[in-house]
């Protein structure tokens, strides 16, 4: 009975973390594979209204800084994200035969201001370094941030 209570409390906690969260910046969030069972979904770009308001100034500043520095052709680095999402989807389709990433991973991508955040789980024998490198070769991607965990 105690175990059932603990599991219910854990499920309620997970639901609370997702409650009232929205993708307020409309950032691309892609669930690209699900081969590893039990890999928890990340929160991704979903946030509460208060979190959105707390980050608004910094989001504007980060978005415009690359254009001000002369590193971007568009005036806001978030304006690249939809095109990057389309490009990375095409790249992923061509990578599966050589890397077998669909068969060895459970992954989500969040794309924000030319960064790709890679979350999820990968098999121990998966070439994570090569995969991250291949994602980074996508046009207009400034950086890939790997936040994955290795699972047997």
Image (cartoon, rainbow, N blue to C red):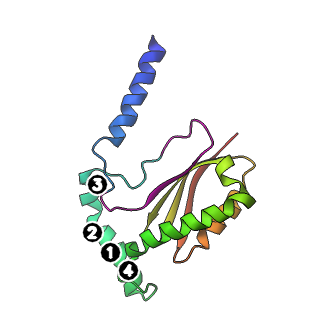
Count of numbered badges drawn on the protein = 4
- Distance, label 3 to label 4, CA atoms, is 21 Å
Q: Earlier in the sequence, mark 4 or mark 2?
A: 2
Quadrant where the N terminus lies?
A: top left
- Distance, label 2 to label 3, CA atoms, is 11 Å
Q: Are marks 2 and 1 in contact (CB under 8 Å)?
A: yes
Q: Which residues are magenta?
A: 24-41
- Residue on which the image places disc 2: 57
Secondary structure, magenta segment, majority class: loop
- Corner quadrant of residue 127: bottom right
How crowded is the residue under tag 3: few (<14 C-alpha within 10 Å), some, or many (20+)? few
Q: Earlier in the sequence, mark 2 or mark 3?
A: 3
How crowded is the residue under tag 4: few (<14 C-alpha within 10 Å), some, or many (20+)? some
Q: Position of residue 107 (x, y in %)?
A: 56, 51
Label 4 element class = helix
Q: Position of residue 7 (x, y in %)?
A: 45, 23
* Up/down of 71 relative to 77, above or below: below
- Corner quadrant of residue 112: bottom left
- Residue nearest the observer in this picture, 100 or 128: 100
- Distance, label 4 to label 2, CA atoms, is 12 Å
- Corner quadrant of residue 76: bottom left
- Residue on which the image places disc 1: 61
- Report if residue 113 is visible in the image: no
- Residue on which the image places disc 3: 51
Q: Earlier in the sequence, mark 3 or mark 1?
A: 3
């Amino acid at each position: 009975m105690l175990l059932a209570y603990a599991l219910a409390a854990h499920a309620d906690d997970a639901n609370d973390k997702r409650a009232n969260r929205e993708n307020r910046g409309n950032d691309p969030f892609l669930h690209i594979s699900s081969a590893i069972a039990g890999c928890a979904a990340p929160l991704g770009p979903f946030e509460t209204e208060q979190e959105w308001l707390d980050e608004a100034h910094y989001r504007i500043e980060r978005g415009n800084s690359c254009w001000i520095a002369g590193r971007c052709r568009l005036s806001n680095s978030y304006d690249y994200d939809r095109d990057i999402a389309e490009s990375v989807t095409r790249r992923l389709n061509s990578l599966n035969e050589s890397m077998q990433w669909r068969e060895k991973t459970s992954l989500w991508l969040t794309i924000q201001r030319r960064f790709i955040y890679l979350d999820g789980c990968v098999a121990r024998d998966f070439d994570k370094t090569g995969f991250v490198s291949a994602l980074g070769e996508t046009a207009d991607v400034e950086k890939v941030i790997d936040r994955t965990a290795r699972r047997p």
